[in-house]
Image (spheres, rainbow, N blue to C red):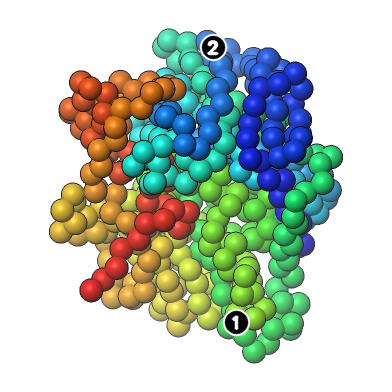
Amino acid sequence: MRLEIGNINIQDIQFGDKTEVKNSILYVEKEALINAISGDDHIRSIDVEIVRPGESVRITPVKDVIEPRVKVDGPGGIFPGILSKVDTVGEGRTHVLKGAAVMTTGKIVGFQEGIVDMTGPGADFTPFSKLCNVVIIAEPHEGIKQHEHEYAVRLIGFKAAKFLGEAGRNVTPDDIEIYETKPLFKSHEEFPDLPKVAYVYMLQTQGLLHDTYVYGVDAKKIVPTLLYPTEVMDGAIVSGNCVSACDKNTTYIHLNNPVIHDLYKLHGKEYNFVGVIITNENVYLADKERSSNWTAKLAEYLGLDGVIISEEGFGNPDTDLIMNCKKISEKGIKTVLLTDEYAGRDGASQSLADSDPSGDACVTGGNANMTIILPKLDRLIGHQEVIDVIAGGFDGSLRADGSIEVEIQAITGATSEVGFNKMTARMY
């Protein structure tokens, strides 16, 4: 598959009389956007605000972050199986409003939604403080069920990203990036002397409100399978979970997964990047065994020399991570693990809930239990009163003066387990 990503650089977002891109500014017709995303009976009200890097703004609780995109050539459409037909994506051309994002907030769904500060010390821990964000505030009717609330807000976010992405359909991109993965046998023939490498992409699927969707299918219902890397880059995988904010793979992160982007950089030079194995994270032992068995089988079947394995979440998924690592290593395939740590606020506790000697090459996104003090900011979007109960908060986190003391677990994207952040740790 050959995919062209046309990046349209967005340096500012403003409300206007028409939704369009001019001179690197995204103009948004507010009422037209609200009309396009309204209509769900579970939602009482929708409002839209714009926030920019450096502004004294806090958004919480953040549910998802989505990059506006539009399919301009090739099969399929944006968010296949959800907003578009289930045609296979990953080919043709997709235009991206680079530097812009849709962010959803409103009344909290569960307890694992996060904080995004656009300035101050908290901004340094979230990649989304560097973007111009269209924030959708979707407030539900009282009494609706959590899964209904999550579904409604998720769809609103996708619809908003599609609506805004259309503004880039007929715009000439500032640059075009080309990514290509050939069918397996052709790839092997083209690079016979290079080591064969794949990415084992673990998706969060641990029950209600812990969902990830592949072409619209809840990934807890799949067995491990293969994707072209360009399918992921073109919207085949989207977030639908409410796990801890620090290591949640938002839809924006799935679309821009740095493991996939970086593996392409040396593809055909130092190694042969043959594809992506997607697998789920399970609750029951038998399901963990099944998925890890299939993942190792696929790695062997592809004739791989090495894999990178990333997880999403912590604790229970650590078992899936180590099972995948151990079983793939037993096939004679080298592994590198991507994770983060929950090592206590002093960093002295066990970092992962499971381990094995085969996991001897590991990259960490940082210690999520580290605490930070976030000063009061001038403007709040959302509901700050939930700070004490979200994951990473505690009784007294929200102080009387409006400042916040929390673990960085509460900051969206702080310890990204695919490396979509700036944190790590070093062993001395």
Q: Can residue 84 be spotted in the picture? A: no
Q: From what the image shows, is residue 255 above or below residue 359?
A: above
Q: Residue 58 location in percent, x, y?
A: 40, 29
Residue at 51%, 21% (x, y): give it. 137
Whether residue 226 sits left or right of residue 184 in the image: it is left
Indicate the quadrant containing the C terminus: top left, top right, bottom left or bottom right.
bottom left
Amino acid type, label 1: Glu
Badge 2: how crowded within 10 Å, few (<14), some, or many (20+)? Answer: some
The residue that mark 2 highlights is: 45
Q: Residue furthest bottom?
A: 193
CA distance for labels 2 and 1:
53 Å
Q: Earlier in the sequence, mark 2 or mark 1?
A: 2
Residue 189 image point, x, y percent = 74, 83
**Which of these two is toward me, 122 or 196?**
122
Q: Is residue 319 above or below residue 30?
A: below
Task: Specify whether 250 is left or right of 338.
Answer: right
User: Disc 1 marks which residue?
Assistant: 270
Residue at image point 45% right, 15% down: 144
x and y percentages locating residue 299 in the rendered image: 54, 72
Q: How many marks?
A: 2
Residue 406: x and y in percent read: 25, 37
Q: Nearer the viewer, residue 310 or 81?
A: 310
Instruction: Write the residue at 74% across / 70% down.
Output: 182
Which amino acid lies under the numbered mark 2 shown in the image of this protein? Ser
Q: Label 1 crowding class (10 Å Cα cut-off): few <14, some 14-19, many 20+?
A: some
In the image, is 315 to the left or to the right of 245? Answer: left
State yes or no: discs 2 and 1 in contact (Cβ < 8 Å): no
